[in-house]
Image: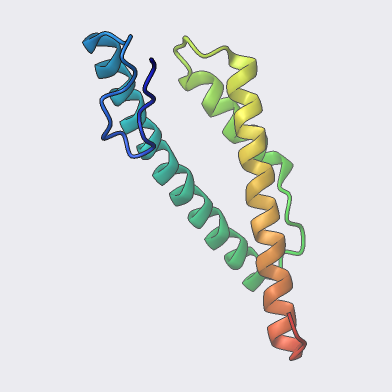
Amino acid sequence: MRRVADASGGGRGRLDESAELRRLRRRIDALDRRIVRLLNDRADLAREVGRTKALEGRRAIRDPEREREVLLRVTMANEGPTPQADLLAIYRRLFSVARALEARDRRTADEDRDGTQR
């Protein structure tokens, strides 16, 4: 009989797992929680950037030069073992999420300014 840990991480895990495997997986779970917080912090900052760009009259949401700079820094910072292509794909997805949030924020601001319904 196999028992699976609950999502909170408080369970003992599967009966056939060693203590070492459970310990390592708990460390991964803790890292995952930190990563989620960091991703949300990054998204909040990206939204602030979007609001600032809008206040400064910058119409473009996408900034290809900035994206290239970030990808270059990420490439230089990567010491492995994550393959470069995979890390860059993750960051391109982060850019996409940030652009979607910025577009949504701009639509909301435009609707609020125009007095239209959301």
* Residue displayed at 28% across by 17% down: 22
Would you say residue 76 is visible in this rendering?
yes
- The x, y position of residue 48, in whole percent, is 53, 62
* Residue displayed at 62% across by 19% down: 86
Tell which residue pokes out farthest to the front in this image: 1
- The vertical placement of 76 against 61, above or below, is above
Q: Is residue 11 left or right of residue 111?
A: left
- The x, y position of residue 115, in whole percent, is 74, 91
Name the quarter where the N terminus is drawn. Answer: top left
Q: Is residue 24 left or right of residue 86?
A: left
Q: Nearer the viewer, residue 25 or 76?
A: 25
Q: Name which quarter of the figure residue 110 lies in.
A: bottom right
- The x, y position of residue 47, in whole percent, is 57, 59
- The vertical placement of 37 against 110, above or below, is above
- The x, y position of residue 61, in whole percent, is 73, 56
- The vertical placement of 1 against 118, above or below, is above
